[in-house]
Structure formats: C-alpha cells, structure tokens
Amino acid sequence: MLNTVYRLTEPRKIEIEFSDVDLNNGTILVRPTHLSICNADQRYYQGKRSAEVLAKKLPMALIHEGIGTVVYSNDSELKVGQRVIMIPNAPVEEDEFIHENYLRSSRFRASGFDGFMQDCVALPKDRLVAVPEDIDPLVAAFSEIISVGYHAVNRFLQFSHDRRKTIGIWGDGNLAFLVALILRYRLPEAKIVVLGKNQYKLEYFSFVDETYLITDIPVTFQPDHAFECVGGEGSPVAINQIIDVIKPEATISILGVSENNVPINTRMILEKGLVVFGSSRSGRKDFLDTVRLFTEHPEVVDYFTSIVGQVVDVRNIEDMNQAFELDIKKAYGKTIMLWNV
Amino acid sequence: MVYALVLAGGIGRRMGDVNKPKQYMNIGDKPIIVHTIEKFCLYEEFEKVIVLCPKEWVEHTKSLIKKYIATSDNVVVIEGGSMRNETIMKGISFIENEGNLNDETIIVTHDAVRPFVTYRMIKENIEVTKEFGACNTVIPATDTIVCSVDQKTIAQIPDRAELYQGQTPQSFQALKLKELYESLDDDEKEVLTDACKIFILKGQEVRLVNGETFNIKITYPYDIAVAESLLRGIAQC
C-alpha cells in the first residue's frame, strides 16, 4: 500500500514522500490519531543536532510518542478499531541480560528511521500496546515518555540501597514531572523534593512534599538518592549540585540528554561512593507497566492531563510546522498534534 | 451502508503502451490499480470495494487482486460501462442487486489511477456525504484558468480565488444519484460526464473536501515518473 510519509528533509522543512507498505507479512497498520512532540524531535526540527548527524539521518519522519487506531490487522487480539500505543523502539534481537532499549543493534523511530508522522504506520504486533478508550488520549499520546520515567524508576529501585526516605529530583520540566509522579505512586512513603529554576513551573508539582529553587536550597537538604531531569546546558550544574548535596552511597539517575560532554566532579563521586547510572528510552514491558499504572490509578492520568500544553489540529504540512513552532514558544507542557492529515 | 467504487473503466489511450490501460502499469513493484484498491481495503466501514473495469480486463484484475492483496474478501470486480456515469450506475446496480440500495447507502467513487489518495480524504468523504448527501475532493486552483468559446480568443478569465481543481474521491448518496441520473434525457447524459455535475444541475448541494496536490491522476507517461519519484523513500519505512 502506498503510504504518505511526512519527512523532515532539512531543518524546519517537512516534505511528503511515499513508501510502499507490504500488508501481507503480518504487519499491523495503525492510523495515528494523537502525536506528541518531544525535545528530541525539536533538536532535529530546529537543526540543533550536528551537521554530520543531520546529514546522516535526514530525510526522516519525526515523532516517537503517539497513539492511533488499528486500521488493518489479521491478528486475533489486536483487531481493527483497537486504540493502541505505538512503541518506537525496534529491537532486532533478544538478550538475556540487556534490555531491548540498550541493545546497540536496536533501532529507534525518529532517530534511526521514520517516526510516526505518516498517513498510517506499519508495525509488528509486539510494537503495539492496547490502551483502553477511557484513558484520556491526550495523555496516552505521551505514554512513551511516561514509560521512560517508569523504566528509570525501576532501575533506581534495582540499583539503590533500601534507605529511600528523601529523593531529590532536579528539573522542573515534563520529565521531572512524570518521574516525580511515578515515584509518588511507587514510593508513597518517601519524601519527594523537586528542585528547579522556575517558580511558576514548580507550582505544578502539587503532589510532591517540597519544591526548592536551585538558587535557594536549604543547607540541611541531603537526599538519599537523586534524579537528574535537566539535560542540555544545565546538565553540568545540576549533576555537580547533586554530587555536592547528596548522601554517601546514593544513586544518581541521569535522564537529561545533552548534546555536549558534561564535566562532573568525579573526585566527590569516588569519595562518597556514589552510583551514577543512566537511563534512556524504554521497552515493551515499560509500556505495559505504564498502561497498568493508568488503569489501576485513574487519578494519575488526571495529574498528567495538567502537563498537556497546546493541542493543535493538524491537517497539512503548514499545520505541522505551526505545531512545532508553537511548541518552541511554549512555556510548559507537551504539545499534542491531533493527526487529521 | 458504505460502498467504494474504484473506477477503472478507461482504456488508457494516452499511455505509451496502447495495449495496456494505464491503471495496470506498475509504480514501485505493483500495478497502480492494486495500490489504489489497497487504500480502500483499510476501511472496515466499506461493505464492499467494487472495482469496475473494461470487460476484457475483469479476469486479469481479479488475478492481480488475488496475487497482491491477502485480505480481499470484500473486493469484487465487475464490468464497467463505456462512460464514467454508466460505470457508476453499474456499481449502483450491483448494490441494488445485493438488496442494499436505500436512503442510507453511500458510494465513494474513486479513479483507479489516483493511488495517492489518503486515509483522511476517504474518511472525510464518508463523513461529509453522510451529513450533506454529496461531496467532491478538490484543491485550490494554482494556475490562472482562461475561458475561450471560439478556441481562438479569451472570452473571460474567472477569479482564481473561486476556482478549484476537481479530484476524486467523489461521494454520493447512491439512491439519490440514481434517481437524478435516470431523470436525465439522452442529450443531458451525453453532456453530464461528471456525477457531481448531475447533482448541481438538479439543484442539489455538493460539498467540498480538501484534496492534496500529490493526489495525482496518472494520465501521461510523465506522471509515472512523478509517481516513481514520490516513492523514492521506499526502503525507509
């Protein structure tokens, strides 16, 4: 089937190309309905990746967060009409010890190959997770980033010692919000403290115990463990601040993406015996856990609704550009495209 | 009940290969008509996808569908007519013979040689026709259109802002179209080559659905080259 693909050919330029999808190899075809813009998409859209990376990866359809409706399927479980989350990670092998999202052979939508900005997306069954209709689709649209947070919290629970009385989360953006919220549900007894740069953003974190401006941290604040959800140019400052204030033998979970190498205080990491680990992306199990979180705790979906920013009706390429431009100017939250092209 | 009518009645005189109707030529690895039919197979809402083609191409078309489309249970191939509207009427007769022609029956008619139709266009055709009775897929005209009566001089130049280029799908309430068509005399049938025109002539509203510039009709050999170039990203998806 001829499929329309909306590819970024150069920064800020989206063009239409077509691919021929083979419907006879067990593939399931999904019509995207709600697509969520991520900062990673923006780095391509605005041309913030290096010239070498852009030359290698473009043209490529953006977006790796989204849901849709099955429109073609011969599968007995995922039938036509089913609402599904599309998993962007595409593993080509299994490993007993290494998660699918860390296998170097795995490909990733809107990074190694076309993302979800297509008329219909062809996916194998194991790259789809059914999501109930009563879950707000504007939230389900960014299940991917929630699953990344869920995955990171799982790893934190795996790597950290059992004293988890106070947990610090550096960052006041979307990632910090969802990590804090997941922690709230996974560790209801823990004191969760969010540290950010913007007071108006910190005010969204109504469910945590404390929020501090990074310029005004109490001297008594010494978290047992910490998450870094800052990324970008703020990464070195945030990570070094964590190293300074955190207790010995703590874990530091790094989640923020930075284009540049980050100089950090390794002397103090050694002295305190800190465990610093990274988490990135997620796998099928994390998506299943995320949907379970939605269904078992419907109120968590309401919390996530508060970070839905702009909702843009997208009917053509002009609308796509408009959505990306609005997302750049946004003060806070996720930009969702209602995919009506 | 919604039916798709894929109109493959043309004999393709304008293609380089005069023996093969243009809808049977390949783009990518498949005949154009197969690409088009596949688009309509994505809609569970279609009771049937009726493919109407010249009599001598019916069996060949059936073979192609069997070869390329795994889930083609709701695709039927029947002989079309000599004119476009006759072909549509044959499709409506088929629906009538199935006992499904009533006020609720909608037909989405589409040129077999427009394989780049999108999910959205088909969806909006169905929605708009359910509400308003008829629609035509169009794009705003980009060229200045001139009108000449004597074929030598310009009679008028219509305001481009009011002009659109017609594409397909065109969709109708089937029973209404049949009644309107049957009310035409032979001369009118000769002149009214477009089904939307019948509606308009009879004072019926025809709504517009936004098409796409890439929803091209493959008419000339040049169009095949364009279609192939549109497909250049084939390995990436």
Image (cartoon, rainbow, N blue to C red):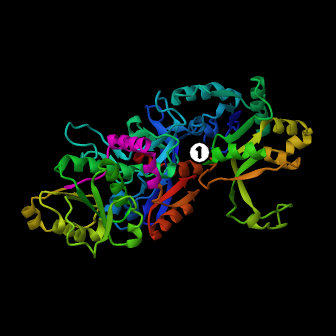
Is residue A221 positioned above or below B24 on the image? Answer: below
Question: Between B108 and B21, which is closer to the camera in this rendering?
Answer: B108
Q: On the image, numbered disc 1 is attached to which residue? A: B119
Image coordinates for residue B160, horizontal then vertical, percent: 74, 66
Instruction: Residue A244: name its quadrant.
Output: bottom left
Question: Between A219 and B172, which is closer to the camera in this rendering?
Answer: A219
A178 vs A160, left or right, is: right
Residue at 84%, 45% (x, y): give it.
B198
B129 vs A246, left or right, is: right
Circle 1 chain? B
Image coordinates for residue B95, horizontal then vertical, percent: 75, 28
Residue at 77%, 31% (x, y): give it.
B92
A325 vs B133, left or right, is: left
Residue A148 appears in the picture as rendered: no
Residue A121 appears in the picture as rendered: yes
Image coordinates for residue A33, horizontal then vertical, percent: 53, 48
Helix, strand or loop status at disc 1: helix
Question: Between A184 and A281, which is closer to the camera in this rendering?
Answer: A184
**Magenta stretch encompasses residue A183:** no
Residue at 82%, 67% (x, y): give it.
B154
Is residue A266 positioned above or below A129 on the image? Answer: below
Neighbours of disc 1 within 10 Å: few (<14), some (14-19), many (20+) = many
Question: Between A172 and B130, which is closer to the camera in this rendering?
Answer: A172
Instruction: Residue A201: name its quadrant.
Output: bottom left
Image coordinates for residue B126, horizontal then vertical, percent: 69, 42
**Magenta stretch encompasses residue A302:** yes
Magenta portion: prevailing SS class: helix
In this view, the residue farthest toward the bottom is A215
Highlighted magenta segment, given as a residue range: A277-304
A256 vs B187, left or right, is: left
Amino acid under disc 1: Tyr
